[in-house]
Image (cartoon, rainbow, N blue to C red):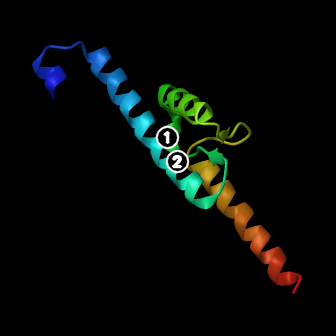
Amino acid sequence: MEGIRAGAAAYRLALDFHIAIARSSARIAREICARESIDTVALSGGVFMNRLLLQLLTHELKDAGLAVLVPHSVPVNDGCIAYGQAAIARARLAQTASR
């Protein structure tokens, strides 16, 4: 709000917003990865159709030493999430069948 009151350019406010979202998301991801002892983050969902946010967050995560997975063969939006859900369901069914 201070930027708006100060008359900052809209593009600068938008960029600062994206940077803040990427940094806070990276901080949360780092905390979860540390707590769960994992080093890989998958980025999926419609929000990552925003290329700027995807690039900024990927950069933040890689700088933190985390591997970043981004879908390339399926759409990053809900189609990718549905694909992942189907893959998990298939794996669980396979486990059940092998018992």
Residue displayed at 31% across by 15% down: 11
**Residue identifier under label 1:** 26
Assign a secondary structure to mark 1: helix
In which quadrant will I find the C terminus? Answer: bottom right
Q: CA distance from mark 1 to mark 2?
A: 5 Å
Residue located farthest toward the bottom when viewing the structure as drawn: 99
- The amino acid type of the residue labelled 2 equals Ala
Please tell me how crowded label 2 is: few (under 14), some (14-19), or many (20+) other residues with Cα within 10 Å: some
Residue 69 horizontal/vertical position (percent): 68, 41
Residue displayed at 74% across by 39% down: 73
- The amino acid type of the residue labelled 1 equals Ala
Q: Is residue 80 above or below residue 64?
A: below
Instruction: Tell me the tag on residue 29.
Output: 2
Residue located farthest toward the right when viewing the structure as drawn: 98
Residue 41 horizontal/vertical position (percent): 62, 46
Residue displayed at 59% across by 52% down: 33
The answer to whether the residue labelled 1 contacts the one labelled 2, judged by CB atoms less than 8 Å apart, is yes
Choose between 65 and 12: the one closer to the eye. Answer: 65
Residue 18 horizontal/vertical position (percent): 39, 29
Residue 46 horizontal/vertical position (percent): 50, 43
Left or right: residue 7 compared with residue 83: left
